[in-house]
Image (tube, coloured by chain):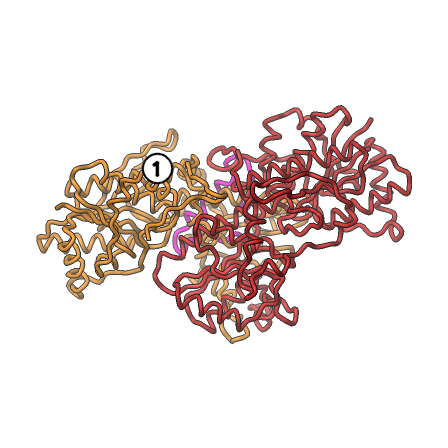
Chain colours: A orange, B red
């Protein structure tokens, strides 16, 4: 038997199940795989022989369609980082036991950096031990920080939610004719791609965020206050987009530095985000109406406003990973190569996973404007195609239908 | 000339422009009105003679359609509370000057409690001074707290966003098999309707919020911790929905009581929401993974996932207000009377605005379960129809189209 195992890992996105469905489409249309299983909670499911039988699912076109638009990882996730097999071979042996027991010849792991590290290590382990097992990675991350792929599944949908939300907030905050500052905190500890995507709120002529601060550039508190004063001089309602991970010139997180003295009734330190910290600063230094808004988990889970481009590409990447793995490619990741921005054209390729794992693709500094408070036209040209199109999501009783696997 | 003036006031919603469009549909299809104007920033626009000419807009079917789905108040808003005319007649005289200058015979004011108070006072002022001017209110509030109407425009769309978001968060937080608590703070200082709407996340079999605390019921910290411990004993990922305005038995806001000792680096008190305060409490008393999520402005501005039922009813209420006012009804508000839950049927009526102004319709205590941590089936039957249907919102370049009036 030549069976296939698929698993998902890392933080959820609105598109990670679309990649799973792409893999399953591959199985369904191919004769190269006999049975297909999912590992529950990522690589931990392979280690602990905790598999889900997906052979009935792939016969159910409706369920597959609903799963495509269901957010988060239907197979569960984990944050398990495998040690080098020279240091701790135990988990590797357990995975191989699971593979042998279920006659798994192909394994596809959908996830981010850590998952690609697992693909790298496990494929290398199989190779040197002459196991007839082939392993491919499928990219996934709202942060868009994976190397060697033009962009990552999940990013476009999060970007569409963020751009839409900022454009809605722009309408909301401008109803009163008084000076106000709304600081929107967007995911990204080290990579500011999602924060940059807030600029897409301008695509139809909206003013979008008036100021944008990415975590790639050292954050200057005085400059920030000057920027806001400058904008308030010509406009009453400001929206400011900031990465959760903005740091000052010393490398200290803005979120930490502002709240260092604050403790609650139990004497515990307050955990404030960067927007909350800057809200306090604006209140202190300017004194106008100011509010912090965190897009929090919603930005990665908002499948109801997923990008059709993102979902379609995510399915294609699953199918690409499938085609690669059954053709005995191993230790690689399916990836997107952009041919052109306009018309938007891409190819699906495979890239060496060793050059993806443990790298982080951050925003190039020359895609941030010289004064550090906006993004350039190169960034806009890169971002624009990624949010195009609305999905065919189905509603039932007023909310989107979802498909659960367990 | 018999001209009509329309204005919007109070906090924005996803449906307040739909009611404006309903008024404009009325003008467009009628011969009783010569010209139509909008007052900018609510009643302040009438006081200060700051009007917007809407006569071109109503000839533009596409613009009217886009405006229907544009969130927030396209005419701007205000928080102006009129004093009794016996105390300060000045603003009343200025409004009448504006009305005379522009030959305004009909005025429709779309808003919440304070706006209905303005309708009440101004119509009474016109009546006793024998002005041939007729004034109607159009209801609006995400809080759903207006008296004499079954529900309020804007509420159903906010409810749909909340239910959808909770169902997406449920997928998100359940990918890891570890104990976790996600506390979602939902708008409502005194009325818990929106928090109750979180239960709609269960309509397709989802578990929805595991616990729901409305501001109508005194919040008991010890009971809260016991509730969570009880749920965690049988389930790993919990979602808890809380009103922003939950208060303890002494009437103190939960948000205030927990953060009373916390100050930032400037010595300023932290402004924490109820969810943030309870996050700290869970961390202290239980110690598991815990996170606060605020739905913040998004819940009232999310036109991209507006309820078709809500938008259609909002348009109808504008049209109803128009029909009433041109038939010389005055000092009344257009309202919804529910005929039945299933099949869902309503009538549009007019009610005395004096019985709406300065009242607040809170959740009946018998629609909260006896243990105070959920809502009853009566509540569910009331809520279910309000989120049904998706709107025909148009996208351009990947984000929803909007129409601006200035």
Tag 1 residue? A312
**Residue in the image at 26% along x and 47% along y:** A54
Query: Vertical placement of A52 versus B182: above or below?
Result: above
Q: Secondary structure at mark 1?
A: helix
Q: Residue furthest left?
A: A130
Q: How many neighbours does mark 1 have within 10 angstroms: few (below 14), some (14-19), or many (20 or more)?
A: some
Instruction: Please check the rendered image and state whether residue A190 is part of the magenta-colored stretch, yes or no.
Output: yes
Estimate the x, y position of residue A52 in percent, counting from the top left: 26, 52
Whether residue A281 is visible here, answered yes or no, is no
Q: Chain of mark 1?
A: A
**Pick the front one: B392 or A159:** B392
Estimate the x, y position of residue B245 in percent, counting from the top left: 61, 61
> Does residue A87 appear to the left or right of B142 in the view shown?
left
Whether residue B177 is visible here, answered yes or no, is yes
Instruction: Please check the rendered image and state whether residue B162 is part of the magenta-colored stretch, yes or no.
Output: no
**Pick the front one: A90 or A304:** A304
> Where are the magenta residues, as a range?
A183-210
């Amino acid at each position: 038997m030549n069976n296939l195992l698929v698993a998902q890992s890392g933080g959820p996105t609105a598109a990670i199940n679309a990649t799973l469905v792409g893999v399953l489409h591959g199985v369904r249309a191919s004769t190269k795989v006999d049975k297909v299983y999912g590992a529950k909670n990522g690589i931990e499911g392979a280690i602990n022989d905790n598999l889900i039988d997906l052979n009935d699912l792939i016969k159910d076109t409706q369920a597959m369609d609903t799963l495509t638009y269901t957010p988060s990882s239907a197979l569960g996730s984990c944050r398990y980082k495998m040690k080098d097999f020279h240091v701790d071979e135990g988990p590797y042996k357990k995975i191989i036991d699971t593979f042998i027991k279920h006659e798994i010849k192909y394994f596809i792991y959908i996830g981010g950096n850590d998952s690609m590290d697992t693909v790298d290590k496990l494929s290398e382990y199989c190779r040197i031990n002459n196991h007839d097992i082939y392993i491919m990675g499928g990219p996934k991350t709202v942060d868009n920080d994976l190397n060697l792929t033009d962009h990552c599944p999940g990013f476009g949908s999060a970007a569409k939610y963020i751009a839409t939300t900022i454009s809605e907030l722009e309408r909301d905050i401008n109803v009163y004719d008084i000076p106000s500052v709304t600081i929107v905190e967007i995911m990204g500890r080290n990579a500011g791609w999602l924060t940059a995507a807030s600029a897409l709120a301008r695509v139809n002529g909206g003013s979008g965020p008036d100021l944008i601060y990415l975590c790639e550039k050292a954050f200057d508190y005085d400059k920030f206050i000057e920027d806001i004063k400058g904008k308030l001089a010509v406009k009453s309602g400001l929206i400011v987009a900031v990465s959760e991970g903005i740091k000052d010139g010393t490398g200290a997180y803005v979120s930490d530095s502002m709240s260092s003295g604050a403790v609650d009734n139990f004497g515990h330190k307050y955990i404030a985000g960067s927007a909350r910290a800057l809200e306090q600063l604006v209140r202190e230094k300017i004194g106008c109406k100011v509010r912090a808004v965190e897009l929090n988990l919603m930005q990665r889970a908002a499948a109801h406003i997923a990008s059709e481009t993102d979902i379609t590409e995510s399915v294609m990447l699953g199918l690409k990973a499938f085609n690669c793995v059954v053709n005995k490619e191993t230790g690689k990741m399916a990836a997107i190569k952009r041919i052109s921005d306009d018309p938007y054209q891409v190819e699906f390729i495979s890239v060496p996973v060793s050059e993806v794992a443990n790298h982080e693709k951050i925003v190039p500094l020359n895609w941030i404007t010289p004064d550090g408070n906006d993004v350039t036209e190169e960034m806009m040209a890169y971002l624009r195609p990624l949010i195009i199109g609305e999905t065919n999501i189905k509603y039932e009783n007023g909310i989107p239908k979802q498909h659960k696997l367990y």
